[in-house]
Structure formats: structure tokens, C-alpha cells
Image (cartoon, rainbow, N blue to C red):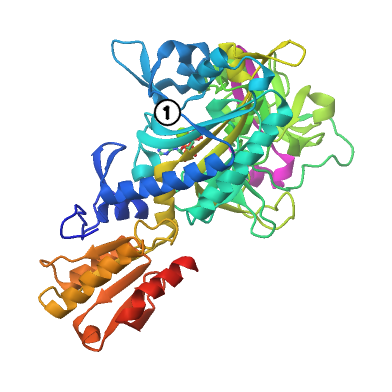
């Protein structure tokens, strides 16, 4: 591709509204342009990358037996009401005005609708159906470029199985395909156990890259490789203890003491003796949640226990139900409450908690003796430095970006839409589904997040839009023009993708800056001094290392590099 004839508008300045490197560099490298909040046009260079990513994905999906579909983005609202997801997605789903239609944020419903009409027998199963298609989500504050768009491309696939073992197989096939896809895309990724969110279902894993630009948070162990989304991460912290003999409960006056830290200082006591209370409403029942000391309640773990509809109580509701304000609530003397506690408090005694009376606490609470605990659950958020649950080494808590997500959905969608098949005994059973997504543009942006320097992008060999950036340094010199032109032809004959900077109206310095910004792995520089000695300079974009070669050896050098 010749830069003199093609549309590749690079920018010298960093656009002020782009905050993260991938967003800045995709704008500067002429890959994308914004059209509205979270909506981007892909220009030819950007779309070339999109096509590369899609090719890698198609390859690996076809290799596990995936069959490619193309499903409509415009969906009847009714279908989404049948599964209850019109409500679950809420404002995130775009609705069409004046028509009962929505723009699909994902495609479980449509897949299940097709399966319901055409999968009749266990002999029709298993199936892996996929597509690469535009999704629409009204993301609240899209500000990370194409990492979070309101319109984006997703590879979404769905497995349909007759048995739970079959689902395991389909899921594992996807996990392997995903590893290959992200490796081929040149990404350093890790896999975490995750919570299933609005999708429903049981097992799910996310493929992540560590990045400061990430909106997800994960606990990772560099020692043994344990990694989990903070929504589900665990650590090996010690429990509050059951020790000594349980003394009778006593009321203590704690004027103006509201927080756990204030209580610790006021009573000169270790945190493990303090139980903090939080109250949520599940349907019409208030639920008191006991946490040890300053442990942070993890809402996503909690909602996994109480259901997604549960909500924290407002201060006035709290006062009406307990007689006290936030800092003085406790598990003793409540009526009509369900009480659950964090695992760390299991069976503990001699605890201090609120007295349900402002400015008072109770001491010597024995959870076994005094409280009807309806379940101990892991409900805390892991903190940096806590011991890894598998090897006890300190965990790091890092920001991360999700590249892909695989879910074992089970029969949720088949049940809702009545997608049944007949088993060997002629008995009707719901189809067992899995769902698997990858963000196409996210792969590109994440590659840039992981691979750039102050001068621009550094593409990996496998993802790079071109293998070689051929720079004609001075187009006034006929000799070097003819050398560059002939190299351009030879690269094309050898099927080497080459971006050729043959522009006559920009300075050499400008061309070198653009070459670094655009980030092709090899720069082949055709300049006066070297050419007059029969030589060409090749620069490795990643290392900056320069080699001087005889002109006749350049193509072969690039071919060797491509094979290596
Ligand atoms: P996130 O937590 O980042 O919002 P998600 O859990 O909503 O992601 P899924 O519904 O599992 O994502 O979608 C599958 C994949 O689609 C994600 O792993 C991600 O790569 C991509 N994706 C999701 N939302 C967006 C978006 N708004 N813009 C670009 N890609 C997205
Ligand atoms: Mg999302």
C-alpha cells in the first residue's frame, strides 16, 4: 500500500479527550475516528487490523467445529421479554422508538429461538454456532476508546448439548481455542474464575490482560499463577477465633463511636473481635450481614447469595427497622431479620457489635450461643498482600481488561424459550447451552496497551497490519526512488505485506516519526548514503536495532524473519 495514494491520516498531537495509550495511538495512527460517544469509524488501517483479528478467530473457531452464522442486530423485544433479559439489561439495551424492537447486546435469545425450531433430537446435538457481528450496548460512560464502545464487534459462540458432560467438552474446546486466539494475537493474558453477571449460569472464566486502563480488578499470584476476578477472589486470611470461655453479654457506652477504626481505638482492641453489621433488603425481608472488623463486603459475592434484586437499606429504613443508625447496628435483639455472616466469623465468640441503640455496643457476643446465623459465606473482598489461597504467597490486586468470557449457561435459555430435544428414550429435555464471547476491537486495543512506547505502537509479527514499512527517504533522488520502487515490487511478489511511504511532500524526519507511530515490526529504510554503497538499512521497531544489508539480500532477510 502506497502512502502517497491511500488514506492514512496520522496525527502528531495527542488528542486531548483520549486518556489511555491505546485510544490515543489508534487515533494518532489513523485507525479510528470518533463519531459520537462510544461510536467509532474504522478507517482502512484500523479495519485491516479488524480483518486480521477476525481471520485468527475464524480459523480457531472453525478448528473446533464452529459453524459461522450471521444473526440480525434488530431483535423483537418480545423475545427478550420471554427470557426476562429486557429487564435484566435495563438501560444498557437500546430500544427502538415506536416499535417493539431492540438492538441486540448479545445473541443467546436468537440462537435459542433457532435451536427451538430446528433441534429435534439428541442426534442433532452437539452444535457449536458462532458469528462475528455488531453488538449494541448503551454503556454508561464510554471513555476508553474502542475498549468500551456502544457499538462493537463481538465474536459470540454458543454450544448446544444434550448432556452436561457434552457442555463440559464444548466449554473446554472453547477455552483451548481462546488460548490459541489470544496467543496468536500476540497478547500476554491470564485466565480468571469469574461471576456470571446478567448472563446467568454456573461456571465461567474470563480471559484478561493486566492493564492500568482496566475497569476490572483481579487478584493474581505471581508465584503459583492463581488469578481471580475480585468479584469472586478468595484469600487465605485467618479467622476470628472461638477462644476462652464465652462471657455474658454486656452493654458498653461508646459515645460518638461510629466506625470500626474509632471502635478499635476507643476500646484498644484487635480488629478480629469486632463484627460490623450491614443490612440489605431481600424482597421484603431485611438481611443483616456480619463482617469481621474492617473487612469489605463484596457486593457481587453477596448478590450471588441473596439474588440480584437485593439492595442495601436506606438510612431512614435502617433506623425504622433497628432503632439505630448505621454505626450502631448489631445482631442481637432484632425481629424479622435473616442473619448471615462472613466465613471468617464462623463460630466466633466474645465479639463486639452494635447494640441497635445509638452510642452503645454489646460485648461478649457468641455467634453460636446468641445469634441464629442462617449461613456462613465468603462475602469479603480480597485485599492486596493477603496470602494466596493456593500457595500462601502475597496476592497482587491489579486492574485488568477482559478480552473474552466463557460461560456454562445450562438450561436457563432453553427453559425460558422452551427449546427442547428428545433424548434416546423419547423424553423431552431442555437443550444445555454455553455462551462464549470475544471483543474484536478490544483485542487490537489491548495489544496496543501491552505493546507501545513513547513513539508509538509496536505490533507483534502475527497481528501487525503490514510486515514491513518501506521508507523512501528522499524522493528527489532518482536512484533511490528506483531502488525503493523495485523493493516494493519484490516484496509484493514475495507476498510480504508492505506499507510503502513514497510520499514526496513530507520530510524524512516526518516519515521516520510516522513509521515509529504506525509500529510495523520492520522498517526498511532506503536512503541516499546507504544506497550509494549498494546497502539498505533495516530497523527493528521493537528493539530499535539497525542492520545494514546489501540491497539484494533484503527480501530474503524479511522472508527469513517471517518464518522464524
Ligand atoms: P465488560 O465487563 O468489560 O463490560 P462484559 O462482561 O459485559 O464485559 P460480555 O458480555 O461477556 O462482556 O461480552 C463478551 C466480550 O465482548 C467481552 O469479553 C469483551 O471483550 C467484549 N465487550 C463487551 N462489552 C464491550 C464494549 N462495550 N465494547 C467493546 N467490547 C466489549
Ligand atoms: Mg459489560
Answer above or below: position of 53 versus 360.
below
Query: Which residue shows up at 59% across the image and 11% down it?
Result: 418
Residue 61 position within the rendered picture, expressed as x and y whole percent measured from the top left: 53, 40
Which residue is the site of mark 1?
A: 70
Residue 287 vs residue 376: left or right? left
Q: In the image shown, does 339 or 369 lie closer to the viewer?
A: 339
Task: Find numbered disc 1 in the image and state the secondary structure of the residue it sits on.
Answer: loop
Task: Look at the image and say whether residue 97 sits in the magenta stretch.
Answer: no
Q: In the image shown, does 175 or 98 lie closer to the viewer?
A: 175
- Which residue is most to the bottom? 533
Residue 522 position within the rendered picture, expressed as x and y whole percent measured from the top left: 36, 69
Answer above or below: position of 424 versus 502.
above
Residue 438 position within the rendered picture, expressed as x and y whole percent measured from the top left: 49, 40
Q: In the image shown, does 474 or 298 lie closer to the viewer?
A: 474
Residue extent of the magenta highlight: 259-287
Q: Quadrant of residue 150?
A: top left
Query: Which residue shows up at 63% across the image and 17% down it?
Result: 286
- Which residue is most to the front? 493
- Look at the image and tell me whether residue 242 can be seen: yes
* Quadrant of the rendering where the N terminus is positioned: bottom left
Residue 360 vs residue 105: left or right? right
Residue 48 vs residue 418: left or right? left
Query: Which residue shows up at 42% across the image and 42% down it?
Result: 440
- Look at the image and tell me whether residue 282 can be seen: no
Residue 31 position within the rendered picture, expressed as x and y whole percent measured from the top left: 28, 50
Query: Around disc 1, counting alpha carbons within 10 Å, would you say few (fewer than 14), some (14 to 19), or many (20 or more)?
Result: few
Amino acid at each position: 500500500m502506497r502512502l502517497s495514494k491511500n488514506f492514512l491520516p496520522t496525527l502528531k498531537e495527542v488528542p486531548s479527550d483520549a486518556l489511555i495509550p491505546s485510544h490515543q495511538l489508534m487515533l494518532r495512527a489513523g485507525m479510528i475516528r470518533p463519531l459520537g460517544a462510544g461510536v467509532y469509524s474504522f478507517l482502512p488501517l484500523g479495519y485491516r487490523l479488524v480483518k486480521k483479528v477476525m481471520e485468527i478467530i475464524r480459523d480457531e473457531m472453525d478448528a473446533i467445529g464452529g459453524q459461522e452464522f450471521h444473526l440480525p442486530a434488530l431483535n423483537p423485544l418480545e423475545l427478550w421479554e420471554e427470557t426476562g433479559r429486557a429487564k435484566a439489561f435495563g438501560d444498557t439495551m437500546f430500544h427502538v422508538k415506536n416499535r417493539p424492537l431492540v438492538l441486540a447486546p448479545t445473541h443467546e435469545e436468537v440462537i435459542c429461538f433457532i435451536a427451538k425450531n430446528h433441534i429435534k433430537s439428541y442426534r442433532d446435538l452437539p452444535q457449536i454456532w458462532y458469528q462475528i457481528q455488531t453488538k449494541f450496548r448503551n454503556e454508561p460512560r464510554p471513555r476508553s476508546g474502542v475498549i468500551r464502545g456502544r457499538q462493537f464487534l463481538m465474536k459470540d459462540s454458543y454450544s448446544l448439548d444434550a448432556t452436561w458432560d457434552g457442555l463440559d467438552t464444548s466449554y473446554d474446546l472453547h477455552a483451548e481455542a481462546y488460548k490459541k486466539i489470544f496467543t496468536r494475537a500476540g497478547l500476554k493474558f491470564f485466565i480468571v474464575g469469574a461471576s456470571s453477571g446478567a448472563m446467568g449460569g454456573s461456571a465461567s472464566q474470563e480471559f484478561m490482560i493486566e492493564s492500568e486502563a482496566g475497569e476490572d480488578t483481579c487478584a493474581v499470584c505471581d508465584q503459583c499463577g492463581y488469578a481471580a476476578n475480585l468479584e469472586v477472589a478468595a484469600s487465605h486470611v485467618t479467622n476470628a477465633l472461638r477462644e476462652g470461655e464465652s462471657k455474658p453479654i454486656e452493654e458498653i457506652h461508646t459515645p460518638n463511636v461510629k466506625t470500626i477504626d474509632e471502635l478499635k481505638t476507643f476500646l484498644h482492641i484487635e480488629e478480629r473481635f469486632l463484627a460490623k453489621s450491614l443490612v440489605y433488603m431481600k424482597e421484603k425481608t431485611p438481611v443483616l450481614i456480619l463482617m469481621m472488623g474492617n473487612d469489605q463486603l463484596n457486593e457481587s459475592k453477596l448478590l450471588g447469595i441473596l439474588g440480584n434484586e437485593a439492595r442495601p437499606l436506606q438510612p431512614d429504613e435502617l433506623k425504622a427497622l433497628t432503632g439505630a443508625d448505621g454505626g450502631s447496628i448489631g445482631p442481637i435483639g432484632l425481629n424479622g431479620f435473616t442473619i448471615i455472616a462472613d466465613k471468617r466469623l464462623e463460630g466466633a465468640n466474645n465479639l463486639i457489635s452494635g447494640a441497635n441503640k445509638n452510642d452503645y455496643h454489646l460485648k461478649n457476643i457468641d455467634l453460636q450461643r446468641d445469634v441464629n446465623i442462617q449461613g456462613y459465606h465468603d462475602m469479603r473482598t480480597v485485599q492486596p498482600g493477603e496470602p494466596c489461597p493456593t500457595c500462601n504467597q502475597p496476592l497482587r490486586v491489579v486492574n485488568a481488561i477482559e478480552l473474552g468470557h466463557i460461560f456454562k449457561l445450562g438450561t436457563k435459555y432453553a427453559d425460558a424459550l422452551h427449546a427442547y430435544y428428545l433424548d434416546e428414550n423419547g423424553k423431552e429435555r431442555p437443550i444445555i447451552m454455553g455462551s462464549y464471547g470475544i471483543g474484536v476491537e478490544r483485542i487490537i486495543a489491548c495489544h496496543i496497551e501491552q505493546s507501545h512506547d513513547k513513539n508509538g505502537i509496536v505490533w507483534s509479527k502475527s497481528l501487525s497490519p503490514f510486515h514491513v514499512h518501506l521508507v523512501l527517504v528522499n524522493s528527489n533522488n532518482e536512484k533511490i526512488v528506483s531502488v525503493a520502487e523495485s523493493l516494493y515490487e519484490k516484496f509484493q511478489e514475495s507476498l510480504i505485506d508492505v506499507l510503502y511511504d513514497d510520499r514526496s511532500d513530507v520530510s524524512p524526519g516526518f516519515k521516520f516519526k510516522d513509521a515509529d507511530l504506525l509500529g510495523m515490526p520492520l522498517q526498511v529504510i532506503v536512503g541516499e548514503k546507504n544506497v550509494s554503497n549498494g546497502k539498505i538499512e533495516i530497523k527493528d521497531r521493537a528493539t530499535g536495532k539497525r542492520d545494514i544489508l546489501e540491497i539484494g539480500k533484503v527480501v530474503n532477510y524479511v522472508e527469513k524473519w517471517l518464518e522464524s
